[in-house]
Image: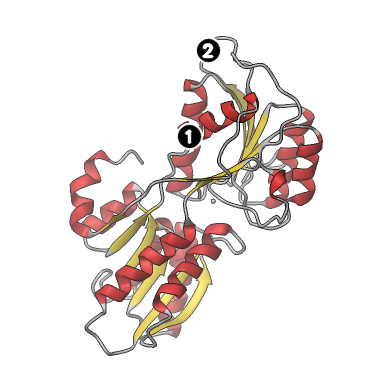
Amino acid sequence: MFKRISGLVLAGLTAMSVAACGSGGSDTSANTTGGGDSTITMGFSQVGAESGWRTANTKSVQDAAKNASITLKFSDAQQKQENQIKAIRSYIQQKVDVIAFSPVVESGWDTVLKEAQNAKIPVILTDRAVDSKDTSLYKTFLGSDFVEEGRKAGKWLVEEYKDSTDPVNIVELQGTTGSAPANDRKAGFQETIGAESKFKIIASQTGDFTRAKGKEVMEAFLKSNPDIDVLYAHNDDMGLGAIEAIEGAGKVPGKDIKIITVDAVKDGMQALADGKINYIVECSPLLGPQLMDLAKKVVKGEQVPARVVTEETVFTQEEAKKVLSTRQY
């Protein structure tokens, strides 16, 4: 059993992933415990429920809290930063032992994180990072390397067109504007394809990580750009929405327009196995167990790494067929 320790500062949670919470949003403060008389209480602020990835991430956190006998106060920000800030302030008022959150966007967190620091409540970032220059405001950041995910997407594209000298017209569906995965997946991708002039990003717009917005933006891309060779979507859900738009335009996804996405949720993997997506870069949402381990350590006052990177892979169509039946999300 852990006793509360004042005087610690835990840095904000991202994971993950990956898409924030607030008492001004949907607050499901009902505690999740694993029984017994757990004394660690975590306030967790989630981005929202914008994608299959985020739903799996939320379930992983809730299940892991229960298994670890950690009381979880959970809030859904509905993708609004103001809701997430309200939630964090509510957790500070409730004097929780640790705060974890996945930031909606990278900027604008210093004030509320300073309030948590002054209250001696440690903060863990999960899935997504913040751009604060004061890294003392949080203890650790648990999540994927989004820049590397973008590089992996770019490497596949470079290899796919290595024997072609023709221009390759690319459209990009970005994640939520200002979010860490959107910024970094774009940067890593551009870094990798930038050395070859044949790769041209002819249109790039946010799809907010949602299937509906991905379809809407892809429809606009198709109307204004008749010659699209490749779609790079920052997550599976936007890619799946784009597939609907591509099919609606009478084109064949995966053939007429090659598609690269990030996440590897089950719906995306099915589309990959079916040949509608060509390549998926994995971004695992199952951060819950690692998060609870980090929470226990910081509450005890133990040192933890400033950055904890999750292990992930990539999938081709054949690889997707092999693992589809065993996907957990």
- Residue 183, image x and y in percent? 55, 65
Placement of 133 over or under 251, stated as above or below: above
* Disc 1: which residue: 290
Which structural element holds mark 2?
loop
Image quarter for residue 22? top right
Q: Work out how far the residue at label 1 is from the one at label 2, CA to CA, in angstroms.
A: 20 Å
Q: How is the image coloured?
A: secondary structure
Placement of 270 over or under 139, stated as above or below: below
* Disc 2: which residue: 35
First in sequence: mark 1 vs mark 2: 2
Placement of 166 over or under 249, stated as above or below: below
**Callout 1 crowding tier (Cα within 10 Å): few <14, some 14–19, many ≥20:** some
Please say whether residue 251 is visible from this viewpoint: no
Image quarter for residue 260? bottom left
Asked whether 310 or 15 is in front, the reply is 310
Check disc 2 and give the amino acid type. Answer: Gly
Instruction: Please identify the residue farthest to the bottom as the structure is shown.
Output: 166
Check disc 1 and give the amino acid type. Answer: Gln
- Residue 71, image x and y in percent? 60, 22
Asked whether 7 or 103 is in front, the reply is 7
**Callout 2 crowding tier (Cα within 10 Å): few <14, some 14–19, many ≥20:** few
Residue at x-position 50% and y-position 47%? 143
Which structural element holds mark 1?
helix
Q: Is residue 50 left or right of residue 156?
A: right
Please say whether residue 101 is visible from this viewpoint: yes
Placement of 188 over or under 165, stated as above or below: above
- Residue 70, image x and y in percent? 57, 22
Residue at x-position 60% and y-position 64%? 177
Q: Is residue 58 left or right of residue 199?
A: right
Indicate which disc residue 15 carries: none
- Residue 249, image x and y in percent? 33, 75
